[in-house]
Image (cartoon, rainbow, N blue to C red):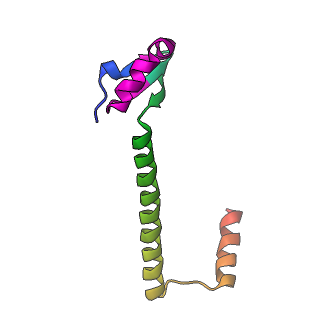
Amino acid sequence: MSITSEDIVPLNQVRARFTKLAEQVRSGKEKIITKNGESYVAIIDARRLDHYHRLERENIHLALLEESGRGWDDVEAGRTFNVSELRSRYKKSKKK
């Protein structure tokens, strides 16, 4: 969804227009509230916020799966360290 100039509202106007803004947001718009001429906060529909949170969790899960796949590839290729080797490498990197 694209933001238009009508979706940008100065903070000092929000209180007087909040009910109308909330109705517009509920019907699918998003509003950017500005403070001193710069983006400050956004008003979005609670259902959309839930959707964004689900997407964020899914993205985290996908990243973890990808990372575990790379780890498994390392194991299969023999790119592993035992604990003492890993500690030694860690100590060397801390000294730099």
Would residue 10 be counted in the magenta stretch? yes
Taking the image as shown, residue 36 lies to the left or right of residue 66, namely right
Taking the image as shown, residue 66 lies to the left or right of residue 27, namely right
Quadrant location of the C terminus? bottom right
Q: Residue at x 42, y 59 (%)?
A: 58
Q: Is residue 11 above or below residue 48?
A: above
Would residue 72 be counted in the magenta stretch? no
Residue 5 lies, in percent from the top left, at 31, 19
In this figure, what is the number of numbered marks?
Answer: 0
Q: Residue at x 37, y 29 (%)?
A: 25
The residue segment tinted magenta is: 9-32
Main SS, magenta residues? helix
Q: Residue at x 65, y 82 (%)?
A: 85
Nearer-the-camera pick, 64 or 32: 32
Nearer-the-camera pick, 30 or 63: 30
Quadrant location of the N terminus? top left
Q: Is residue 47 above or below residue 56?
A: above
Residue 83 lies, in percent from the top left, at 67, 83
Nearer-the-camera pick, 39 or 29: 29
Residue 91 lies, in percent from the top left, at 71, 71
The reply to whether residue 6 is visible in this rendering is yes
The reply to whether residue 77 is visible in this rendering is no
Q: Residue at x 63, y 86 (%)?
A: 82
Residue 30 lies, in percent from the top left, at 37, 30
